[in-house]
């Protein structure tokens, strides 16, 4: 059965005293903040300005707490727009992943083709690392060139080196990897974000991508915070204005095209809390920098992290089919945390979602489902839950009784659906 149909029984009838107590405690906290993870398009989520909420000018924007993924503010977060050079984050991730898997090494060298030089190098008049035509450049240096001065030539060279040509890299490598990361809407026509009608991303998916890079590649992520890069005797500054304007800022990427406007993916850490901001569609670079900085400052000022469920503590129970036990205790190895407004009054509700009943045998540590934390009617945090203990297969009589029970429940549901 689908997880959603199992939620009411699991949550209300099968939870047990510990889980009911936890839910009561969570609701009693009466804490929270504006923001959702799965909001509808063309939406603004968050408290009103007079209530301490954010008031911004960016056509599309999102603010996320990196550890939990909790969304603190969003505006038209699912609207597809040209990501411009912010799309270089996808190119970087593909290369980071290839390095992590051992497919390539940082010391491997790729040739700067005439195509890379002409379309992304000095003759192009666009952002470039000024790599010389036909020269060989290491992947390490190409990543520096792509990330710090936003070199289009560096991105094309990486694409050609990994995939043979840029088109294959964009349509196969980037798209395939994006889908693996859950970026279902993003499409790519090249490696660098230069104007192409196929280059489309949402600020939500850019935030998901940025969060993934930060958490998965902490060593490689340091590249985004380097303030300058010199190549071919030409020193260039990092194009991210936040690095010198906001304490704790260490990434990520700016972008501009006529089609997309001015945009930025930024991140900063203050008081052990990391926030990620994405804005796009602004009319000039100063507005872009001001908007991103203002949103991050508001987030640090207005929110704090609270732990709802400690690591390895019982979260609840899932019903078992055909097992020695009728239920299995669930835990999560990581604490369930959520960013909440310091002066908010929204209630938080947590629920376990799984496809059930879960068929025995069950091994300890087996993933069963997820725990979701709602802020109002919207999901704020979602984390997997696992079986705390093993459950062996039950007797023939036990399996038969469970089968009859599921048959009756299925008939009842079918009858309800016809009403």
Image (cartoon, rainbow, N blue to C red):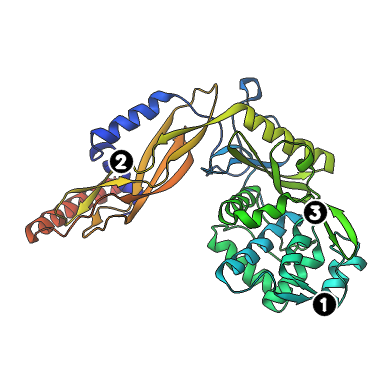
Front of the two marks 2 and 3: 2
Residue 81, numbered label: none
Position of 343 with respect to 369 (left or right) is: right
Position of 116 with respect to 62 (left or right) is: right
Rendered-image quadrant of the N terminus: bottom left
Residue underneath mark 2? 314
Per the model, the C-alpha gap separating discs 2 and 3 is 50 Å
Q: Residue at x 44, y 27 (%)?
A: 347
Q: Earlier in the sequence, mark 2 or mark 3?
A: 3
* Nearest the eye: 409 or 45: 45
Q: Residue 249 at what x, y percent from top left?
A: 70, 41
Q: Secondary structure at mark 2?
A: strand
Residue 193 visible in the shown view:
no
Q: Residue at x 55, y 21 (%)?
A: 343
Q: Quadrant of residue 95?
A: bottom right
Q: Secondary structure at mark 1?
A: loop
Per the model, the C-alpha gap separating discs 1 and 3 is 27 Å
């Amino acid at each position: 059965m689908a997880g959603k149909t199992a939620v009411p029984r699991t949550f209300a009838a099968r939870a047990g005293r510990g889980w009911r107590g936890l839910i009561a405690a969570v609701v009693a906290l009466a804490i929270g903040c504006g923001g959702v993870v799965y909001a509808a398009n063309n939406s603004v989520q968050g408290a009103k300005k007079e209530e301490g909420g954010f008031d911004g000018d960016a056509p599309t924007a999102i603010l996320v707490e990196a550890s939990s993924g909790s969304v603190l503010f969003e505006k038209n977060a699912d609207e597809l727009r040209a990501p411009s050079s912010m799309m270089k984050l996808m190119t970087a991730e593909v290369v980071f992943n290839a390095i992590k898997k051992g497919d390539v090494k940082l010391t491997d060298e790729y040739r700067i083709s005439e195509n890379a030089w002409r379309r992304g190098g000095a003759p192009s008049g666009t952002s470039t690392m000024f790599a010389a035509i036909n020269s060989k450049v290491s992947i390490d240096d190409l990543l520096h060139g792509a990330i710090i001065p936003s070199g289009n030539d560096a991105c094309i060279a990486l694409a050609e080196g990994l995939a043979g040509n840029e088109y294959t890299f964009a349509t196969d490598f980037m798209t395939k990897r994006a889908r693996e990361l859950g970026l279902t809407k993003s499409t790519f026509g090249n490696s660098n974000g230069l104007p192409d009608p196929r280059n489309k991303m949402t600020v939500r998916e850019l935030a998901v991508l940025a969060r993934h890079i930060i958490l998965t590649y902490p060593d490689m992520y340091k590249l985004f915070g380097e303030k300058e890069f010199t190549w071919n005797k030409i020193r260039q500054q990092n194009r991210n204005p936040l690095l010198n304007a906001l304490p704790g800022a260490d990434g990520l990427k700016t972008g501009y095209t006529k089609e997309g406007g001015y945009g930025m993916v930024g991140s900063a850490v203050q008081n052990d809390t990391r926030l990620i901001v994405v804005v796009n569609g602004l009319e000039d670079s100063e507005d872009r920098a001001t908007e991103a900085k203002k949103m991050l400052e508001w987030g640090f000022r207005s929110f704090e992290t609270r732990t709802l469920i400690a690591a390895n503590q019982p979260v609840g129970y899932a019903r078992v089919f055909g097992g020695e036990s009728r239920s299995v205790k669930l835990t999560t190895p990581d604490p369930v945390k959520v960013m909440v407004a310091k002066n908010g009054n929204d209630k938080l509700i947590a629920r376990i979602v799984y496809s059930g009943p879960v068929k025995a045998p069950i091994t300890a540590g087996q993933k069963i489902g997820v725990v979701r934390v709602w802020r109002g009617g919207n999901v704020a945090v979602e984390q997997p839950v696992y079986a705390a203990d093993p459950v062996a297969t039950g007797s023939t009589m036990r399996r038969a009784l469970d089968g009859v029970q599921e048959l009756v429940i299925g008939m009842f549901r079918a009858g309800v659906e016809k009403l």
